[in-house]
Amino acid sequence: MRKPKLSLSISNDPTPDELLFARQLGVDCVYTWVKPEQRAYEYLTRLRERVEKYGLRLYNVGNIAVAKND
């Protein structure tokens, strides 16, 4: 039986303290909304690597410019 995955929203440029806090809460996955200038492959790769250093999984990344359109 699979256990549910707990997730938490993080900022689009999370600090080490923010990621550590998520890990201490027992969260498995995190998600965020990025600005248009942060949608580049290089930025998203660095973000994923930063998140994984804390034992977390970057589960979802949303585009804030698209999500907030009428």
Image: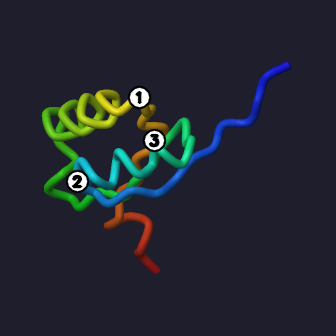
**Direction right: furthest residue:** 1
**Observer-nearest of 15 and 33:** 15
Disc 2 vs disc 1: Cβ atoms closer than 8 Å?
Answer: no
Helix, strand or loop status at disc 3: helix
Above or below, 11 relative to 1: below
Determine which of the numbered discs, if any, sits on residue 17 in the image. Answer: none
Above or below, 66 relative to 30: below
Q: Earlier in the sequence, mark 2 or mark 1?
A: 2
Q: Residues within 10 Å of mark 2 (few under 14, many from 20)?
A: few
| Circle 2 residue | 15
Determine which of the numbered discs, if any, sits on residue 55 in the image. Answer: 1
| Circle 3 residue | 23
Q: Residue at x 43, y 33 (%)?
A: 56
> Quarter of the image holding residue 33?
bottom left
Disc 2 vs disc 3: Cβ atoms closer than 8 Å?
Answer: no
Q: Residues within 10 Å of mark 1 (few under 14, many from 20)?
A: some
Q: Residue at x 55, y 36 (%)?
A: 28
Q: Position of residue 20 (x, y in %)?
A: 35, 45
Disc 3 vs disc 1: Cβ atoms closer than 8 Å?
Answer: yes
| Residue 56 placement, left or right of 42 | right
Q: Position of residue 5 (x, y in %)?
A: 66, 37
Above or below, 13 relative to 47: below
